[in-house]
């Protein structure tokens, strides 16, 4: 059967993989999210092991700021469906998909509810979609079972406010313990996505701050207790000068100026800078517009 890894909301598995075939969900979890959680095995056997844990609300805030606002999610879903329909004719609107998931009260959903679907939430979702009048054919089944990124499911479930306090857990330890992955494999970033998210979040915060220059925005960040800890080496007309800036500003410059050979953007620096920007964004007295 293989060694399993699963993403569960309130103890209901939303996504799973095994051995070397799995989806990385680490980015949904804030730093320091590893804690002891209960793993349940065949026959009701339980063991306590490390796992990534947060609330759906915390994951929701990360999703909203990292490319999955309501508008962005709808656009991405429709692009995935559009590619699927190059060779199919699946009539599934984002509204139907979203409303079906929002209608699910996860606080009352139990493992017993999943048993008729062989504990496969995707098949439970298929039934709920067909109950809404979506045509039940192989195209719908294949799309939900084989093509649909579970991030769309998580994002839609988070739009039901009652679901947000529920625990979200990525039970990774069996995969690690059995040698299929290292912790570094599980926590690697998707560098292109992180660079895009950093650029967008930096820009949105700068617009929010009303700072008209990057230097002025760096001051705004500094006033929000983001320290100036990084030296950025600027190259202009053959002359290299060093400037002490906040990490997000230095990372912004490195992303925007890949032609500059005097700075190296490490993955860990990129990850940390995104977390700094997320921390600033989630503490604003008025949320960034358009990210619900």
Image (cartoon, rainbow, N blue to C red):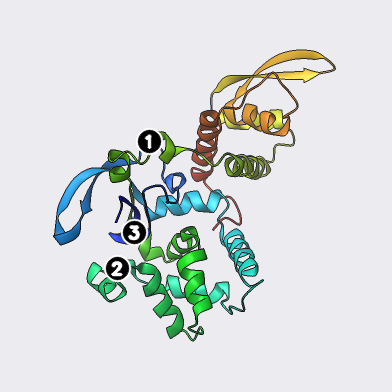
Among the 4 quarters of the image, the one containing residue 248: top right
Q: CA distance from mark 3 to mark 2?
A: 13 Å
Q: Check disc 1 and report the residue beneath it.
A: 183
Position of residue 113 measured from the top left corner of the image (x, y, whole percent): 26, 73
Give me the disc on residue 119. 2
Among the 4 quarters of the image, the one containing residue 71: bottom right
Q: Earlier in the sequence, mark 3 or mark 1?
A: 3
Q: 244 or 132, which is in the foreground?
A: 132
Among the 4 quarters of the image, the one containing residue 14: bottom left
Position of residue 262 measured from the top left corner of the image (x, y, whole percent): 69, 18
Instruction: Tell me the residue at 41%/64% (across/down).
Output: 161
The reply to whether residue 251 is in sight is yes
User: Is 114 situated left or right of 77 in this image?
Assistant: left
The reply to whether residue 219 is in sight is no
Q: Earlier in the sequence, mark 2 or mark 1?
A: 2
Q: Quadrant of the C terminus?
A: bottom right
Q: Do the numbered discs 2 and 1 sit on residues whose CB atoms are within 8 Å?
A: no
Q: Earlier in the sequence, mark 3 or mark 2?
A: 3
Q: Quadrant of the N terminus?
A: bottom left
User: Is 51 situated left or right of 222 in this image?
Assistant: left
Number of residue marks: 3
Position of residue 126 measured from the top left corner of the image (x, y, whole percent): 42, 76
Instruction: Tell me the residue at 41%/42% (across/down).
Output: 30
């Amino acid at each position: 059967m293989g060694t399993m890894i699963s993403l569960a909301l309130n103890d209901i598995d939303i996504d799973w993989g095994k051995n070397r075939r799995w989806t990385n969900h680490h980015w949904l979890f804030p730093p320091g999210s590893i804690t002891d959680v209960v793993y349940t095995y065949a026959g009701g056997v339980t063991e306590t092991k490390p796992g990534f844990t947060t609330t759906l609300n915390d994951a929701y805030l990360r999703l909203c700021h990292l490319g999955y606002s309501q508008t962005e999610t709808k656009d991405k879903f429709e692009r995935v469906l559009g590619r699927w329909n190059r060779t199919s004719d699946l009539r599934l609107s984002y509204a139907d998909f979203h409303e079906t998931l929002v209608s699910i009260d996860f606080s009352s959903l139990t493992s017993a509810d999943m048993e008729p679907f062989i504990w496969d939430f995707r098949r439970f979702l298929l039934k709920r979609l067909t109950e809404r009048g979506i045509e039940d054919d192989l195209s719908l089944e294949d799309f939900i079972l084989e093509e649909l990124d579970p991030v769309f499911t998580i994002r839609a479930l988070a739009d039901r406010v009652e679901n947000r306090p529920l625990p979200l857990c990525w039970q990774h330890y069996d995969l690690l313990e059995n040698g299929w992955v290292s912790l570094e494999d599980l926590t690697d970033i998707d560098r292109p996505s992180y660079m895009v998210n950093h650029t967008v979040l930096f820009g949105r915060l700068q617009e929010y701050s009303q700072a008209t220059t990057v230097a002025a925005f760096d001051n705004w960040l500094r006033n929000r207790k983001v320290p100036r800890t990084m030296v950025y080496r600027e190259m202009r007309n053959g002359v290299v000068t060093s400037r002490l800036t906040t990490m997000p500003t230095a990372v912004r410059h490195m992303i925007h100026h890949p032609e500059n050979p005097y700075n190296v953007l490490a993955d860990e620096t990129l990850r940390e800078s995104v977390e700094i920007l997320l921390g600033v964004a989630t503490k604003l007295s008025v949320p960034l517009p358009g990210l619900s």
